[in-house]
Image: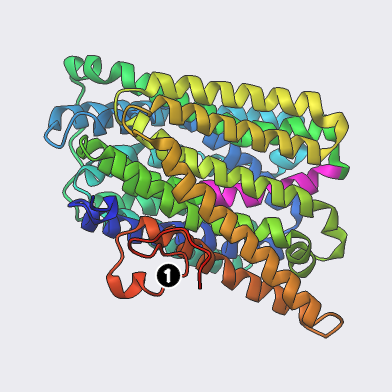
């Protein structure tokens, strides 16, 4: 039997995977670098006000029917009137919600002096709502064309352009205004790079029959996105209230690690998995298997590295005073890996008219997560992080059950392309770190060397463990230490 990766869809899958990886790198690394720069220019209070406004904008935006993206993908590439209807609805909702955001900022200003001091500048952040919602229609059209390159390059162009724009304003003596300009320009440039020169932006017009066609799936998908936004932003507020500020910083550090995995997985889901699943109804089992294998290497490798090396990483990068965050960072790295795996199943459910099922999964995930924080907060942030990781693993199992008819023998696939490679990466990371630390114990730079060599060993071990499941050339298969000899039999003879 030929390998799924060697199927007829392999070229498109590989091309989309490459662009998704590039987009994930740009979506994680570039904003982090820009954030470090503004954190050095501004006080924590100023950065906090900007982050508060951005978080509020993301929650408000989730009420703007962003689920029309999934609804459009299900209509096929020739549904011009559906695209017109979706864009008209998104522009109407985006305009209204931008005004709602400004009103909420004014209300917050009555209770938070820092918001009042920022003044009208925070209202500018509300433009993210309008431009992000307007981008939904042309992005769906690009996804239907499998325009991986344009979809991936958007975030890179937007982050670089917005960073330069905001940086120039900051260097001219207005760092806070520069941060607001950067946050807003991101959405403006993503819209521009999606719509300009692609011919996919339609003239907005409402068609009542198209509204009826998309209403059910758009509503369910929008609820999924709303719950996800609440899950990503509200749990921090609960943690702050239940555990207190003394431990909140350590928990936030772990959440940043988890968010990195979610951002990367979201890139693959939007650019690769959703478009392919919507167009290739007969190859979904291969796509699910390939997606799980890919994210096991991309997200499983850093998760395994953090589990084995969290104390050293936290000490080298953040300093000794952050040592208490190491266990939380390791646990939430595994939680992020689990959520990344779940995104593969979620992508399939979202474009196969099963958004109501996905809505129930995400709703249960969000509400149970908040409940776990409330119940376990007296036992410390480690207990909270462990419970959240187990909850996310249970959600992945639930979504795997929902897609079992699309993915026969999914249990054995999880063993081959997820469990065994992750175990190999964990073993390699622990083994190399322990060996190097023993050899270079007490030597200056020994800890850094152990981290570097351990990090290099992790992806190599994962790829080696995955190799038997991949359609590799014979020359490469012969180099795999985990290969199975042809016509092999059990024997203890020499």
Q: Is residue 382 left or right of residue 465?
A: right
Residue at the image position 19 percent from the left and 52 percent from the top: 198
Q: Is residue 315 left or right of residue 396?
A: right
| Residue that numbered label 1 is attached to | 480
Residue 339 in the image, given as x and y percentages of width and height: 54, 40
Q: Let me know if residue 254 is in the magenta part.
A: yes
The answer, for residue 30, to whether it is visible in the render is yes
Q: Nearer the viewer, residue 287 or 230?
A: 287
- The picture quadrant where one finds residue 285 is top left
Residue stretch rendered in magenta on the structure: 247-262
Q: Is residue 485 left or right of residue 465?
A: left
Badge 1 marks a residue whose secondary structure is loop
Looking at the magenta stretch, what is its main secondary structure? Answer: helix
Residue 289 in the image, given as x and y percentages of width and height: 37, 45
Residue 478 in the image, given as x and y percentages of width and height: 36, 73
Farthest residue toward the front?
493
Please say if 320 is above or below 113: below
The answer, for residue 183, to whether it is visible in the render is no
Residue 316 in the image, given as x and y percentages of width and height: 76, 70
Q: Nearer the viewer, residue 12 or 94?
A: 12
Q: Let me know if residue 423 is in the magenta part.
A: no
- The picture quadrant where one finds residue 19 is bottom left
Residue at the image position 34 percent from the left and 73 percent from the top: 476
Q: Is residue 409 left or right of residue 259?
A: left
Query: How many marks can you see?
Result: 1
Q: Residues within 10 Å of mark 1 (few under 14, many from 20)?
A: some
């Amino acid at each position: 039997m030929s390998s799924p990766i060697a199927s007829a869809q392999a070229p498109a899958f590989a091309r989309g995977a490459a662009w998704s990886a590039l987009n994930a790198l740009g979506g994680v690394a570039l904003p982090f670098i820009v954030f470090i720069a503004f954190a050095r220019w501004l006080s924590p209070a100023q950065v906090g006000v900007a982050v508060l406004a951005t978080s509020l904008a993301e929650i408000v935006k989730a009420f703007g029917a962003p689920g029309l993206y999934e609804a459009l993908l299900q209509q096929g590439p020739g549904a011009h009137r559906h695209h017109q209807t979706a864009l008209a609805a998104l522009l109407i909702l985006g305009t209204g919600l931008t005004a709602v955001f400004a009103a909420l900022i004014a209300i917050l200003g009555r209770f938070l002096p820092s918001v009042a001091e920022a003044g009208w500048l925070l209202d500018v952040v509300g433009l993210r709502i309008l431009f992000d919602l307007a981008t939904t229609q042309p992005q769906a059209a690009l996804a239907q064309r499998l325009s991986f390159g344009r979809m991936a390059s958007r975030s890179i162009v937007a982050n670089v352009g917005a960073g330069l724009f905001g940086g120039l304003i900051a260097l001219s003596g207005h760092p806070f205004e520069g941060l607001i300009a950067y946050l807003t320009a991101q959405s403006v440039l993503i819209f521009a790079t999606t719509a300009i020169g692609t011919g996919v932006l339609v003239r907005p017009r409402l068609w009542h029959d198209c509204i009826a066609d998309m209403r059910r799936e758009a509503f369910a998908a929008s609820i999924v996105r709303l719950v996800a936004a609440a899950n990503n932003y509200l749990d921090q507020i609960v943690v702050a209230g239940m555990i207190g500020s003394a431990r909140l910083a350590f928990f936030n550090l772990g959440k940043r690690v988890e968010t990195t995995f979610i951002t990367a997985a979201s890139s693959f889901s939007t650019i690769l998995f959703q478009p392919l699943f919507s167009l290739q109804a007969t190859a979904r089992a291969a796509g699910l298997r390939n997606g799980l294998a890919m994210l096991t290497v991309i997200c499983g490798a850093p998760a395994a590295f953090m589990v084995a090396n969290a104390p050293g990483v936290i000490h080298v990068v953040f300093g000794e005073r952050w040592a208490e965050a190491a266990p939380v960072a390791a646990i939430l790295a595994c939680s992020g890996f689990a959520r990344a795996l779940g995104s593969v199943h979620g992508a399939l459910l979202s474009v196969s008219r099963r958004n109501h099922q996905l809505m129930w999964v995400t709703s249960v995930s969000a509400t149970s997560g908040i409940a776990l924080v409330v119940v376990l907060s007296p036992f410390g942030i480690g207990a909270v992080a462990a419970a959240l990781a187990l909850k996310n693993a249970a959600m992945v199992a639930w979504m795997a059950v929902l897609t079992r008819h699309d993915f026969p023998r999914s249990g054995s696939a999880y063993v081959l392309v997820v469990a065994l490679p992750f175990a190999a990466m964990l073993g390699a990371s622990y083994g190399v770190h322990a060996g190097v630390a023993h050899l270079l114990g007490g030597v200056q730079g020994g800890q850094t060397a152990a981290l570097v060599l351990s990090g290099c060993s992790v992806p190599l071990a994962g790829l080696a463990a995955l190799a038997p499941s991949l359609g590799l050339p014979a020359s490469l298969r012969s180099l795999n230490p985990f290969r199975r000899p042809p016509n092999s039999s059990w024997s203890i003879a020499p």
